[in-house]
Image: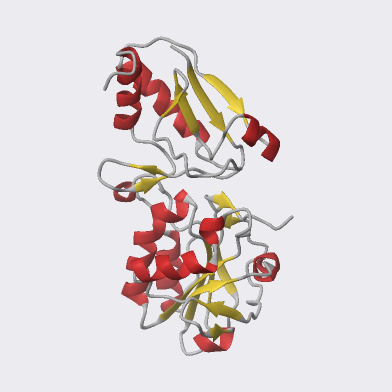
C-alpha cells in the first residue's frame, strides 16, 4: 500500500497528522512506511497538487478530497464526524481510508 | 510587539460597514485584539470558543478580530466572505479588514489566530495563543486569554504574559 503525507512546514499540524496516520495504519494491521514529502514553494504545491497541509493520500487517493481548492501553501481543514472543523483528519476518517484502500477502493 | 508596549492605533473597515479605531473601544477596561481569517482550520477550531468568551465578557471586555490575509492568494479571506461568516456565526465582536496589512505589520503578528490582550491603559499584558489545546476543547488545561482577562479585570497581572501562537501563517502580499 502506498501511503503519502505531504506537508507545509509553516503549518504546525504535520507531526500530529503523521502520528494519527501511523496509528490508523496500526489499527488496520497495515505495516508500511509513510512517504513524507515537504512542500515549501508554490511551484512544489502545484507540482504535487497540494491544496494544504497535511495532505494525505492512500494509493494515490486523497482522504477528504476538496477539488474546488487551489494549490497553495497553507493549512488544510478537515471535517470530523461530529461536524467539527479541524486542522487534522479524525482517526475514524483515516482508518476508513485505509480500509477502503485494503478493499481495493470499494466502500 | 513586546509585553508592555502600547497598542497601535488603526482605522479599519468592519463587516458592519463602520470604520473602527482604538477610541471605539475606550469604554472597556480590557481590549482583546486578535488576528483572524476565514480559511485557516485553527481559526475554525477556535471559533466557537472565542465567540463564547466574547459573549461571556462582552460587557467589560472589547474583542476585536482583524483579518490581514491577502485575498488575492486566498479568496476565502476576502471581505465578502468575512461578512458572510460573521453573519452566519453571529460574531459578537467587530471583524475588521486590514487590507494594507499595515496593522499586522505594526503588531508584528505572524499567525491566525494570534491574541493580544491590553489593559485599561492599552499596554500589552498578554500575547500568544488562546489556550493550550487546539485539538481537544474538552482537554484544555490552561485558558491563557481568559486568565489574562480575569487577571486584568481584578487589577492583577496575567499568570502567563506570552505563549507561542499556534495557527496558520498570515498570508502576506508578494
B69 and A18: which is toward the camera? B69
Q: Is residue A41 visible?
A: no
Position of residue B130 in the picture relative to residue A38 (left or right) = left
Where does the C terminus of chain B fall, quadrant-wise? bottom right
Direction front: furthest residue? A68
Q: Quadrant of residue B70?
A: bottom right
Does A104 appear above or below A86?
A: above
Q: Is residue A96 visible?
A: yes
Q: Where in the figure is residue A7, as x and y percent of width and height? A: 56, 33
Where does the N terminus of chain B fall, quadrant-wise? bottom right
Identified at 46% across, 33% down, the residue is A16
Colour style of the rendered protein structure: secondary structure
Identified at 63% across, 56% down, the residue is B110
Position of residue B1 in the picture relative to residue B24 (left or right) = right
Direction right: furthest residue? B174
Q: Quadrant of residue B163?
A: bottom right
Identified at 32% across, 11% down, the residue is A29
Q: Quadrant of residue B67?
A: bottom right
Identified at 50% across, 56% down, the residue is B129
Does B80 appear above or below B129?
A: below
Does A87 appear above or below B19?
A: above
Q: Where in the figure is residue A78, as x and y percent of width and height? A: 40, 42
Does B103 appear above or below B109?
A: below
Task: Give the total of numbered labels.
Answer: 0
Q: Where in the figure is residue B28, as x and y percent of width and height? A: 46, 85
Amino acid at each position: 500500500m502506498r501511503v503519502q503525507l505531504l506537508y507545509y512546514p509553516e503549518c504546525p499540524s504535520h507531526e500530529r497528522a503523521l502520528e494519527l496516520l501511523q496509528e490508523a495504519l496500526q489499527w488496520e494491521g497495515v505495516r508500511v512506511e509513510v512517504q513524507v514529502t515537504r512542500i515549501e514553494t508554490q511551484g512544489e504545491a502545484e507540482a504535487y497538487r497540494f491544496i494544504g497541509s497535511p495532505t494525505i493520500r492512500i494509493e494515490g487517493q486523497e482522504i477528504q478530497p476538496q477539488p474546488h481548492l487551489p494549490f497553495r501553501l497553507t493549512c488544510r481543514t478537515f471535517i470530523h464526524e461530529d461536524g467539527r472543523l479541524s486542522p487534522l483528519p479524525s482517526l475514524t476518517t483515516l482508518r476508513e481510508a485505509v480500509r477502503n484502500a485494503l478493499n481495493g477502493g470499494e466502500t | 510587539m513586546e509585553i508592555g508596549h502600547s497598542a497601535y492605533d488603526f482605522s479599519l473597515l468592519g463587516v458592519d460597514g463602520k470604520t473602527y479605531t482604538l477610541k471605539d473601544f475606550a469604554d472597556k477596561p480590557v481590549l482583546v485584539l486578535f488576528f483572524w481569517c476565514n480559511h485557516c482550520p485553527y481559526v475554525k477550531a477556535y471559533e466557537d470558543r472565542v465567540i463564547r468568551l466574547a459573549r461571556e465578557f462582552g460587557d467589560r471586555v472589547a474583542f476585536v478580530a482583524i483579518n490581514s490575509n491577502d485575498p488575492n492568494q486566498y479568496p476565502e479571506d476576502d471581505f465578502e466572505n468575512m461578512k458572510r461568516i460573521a453573519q452566519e456565526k453571529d460574531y459578537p465582536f467587530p471583524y475588521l479588514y486590514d487590507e494594507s496589512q499595515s496593522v499586522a505589520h505594526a503588531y508584528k503578528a505572524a499567525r491566525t489566530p494570534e491574541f493580544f490582550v491590553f489593559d485599561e491603559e492599552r499596554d500589552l499584558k498578554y500575547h500568544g495563543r488562546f489556550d493550550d489545546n487546539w485539538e481537544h476543547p474538552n482537554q484544555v488545561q490552561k485558558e491563557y486569554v481568559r486568565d489574562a482577562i480575569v487577571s486584568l479585570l481584578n487589577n492583577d497581572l496575567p499568570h502567563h504574559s506570552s505563549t507561542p501562537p499556534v495557527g496558520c501563517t498570515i498570508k502576506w502580499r508578494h
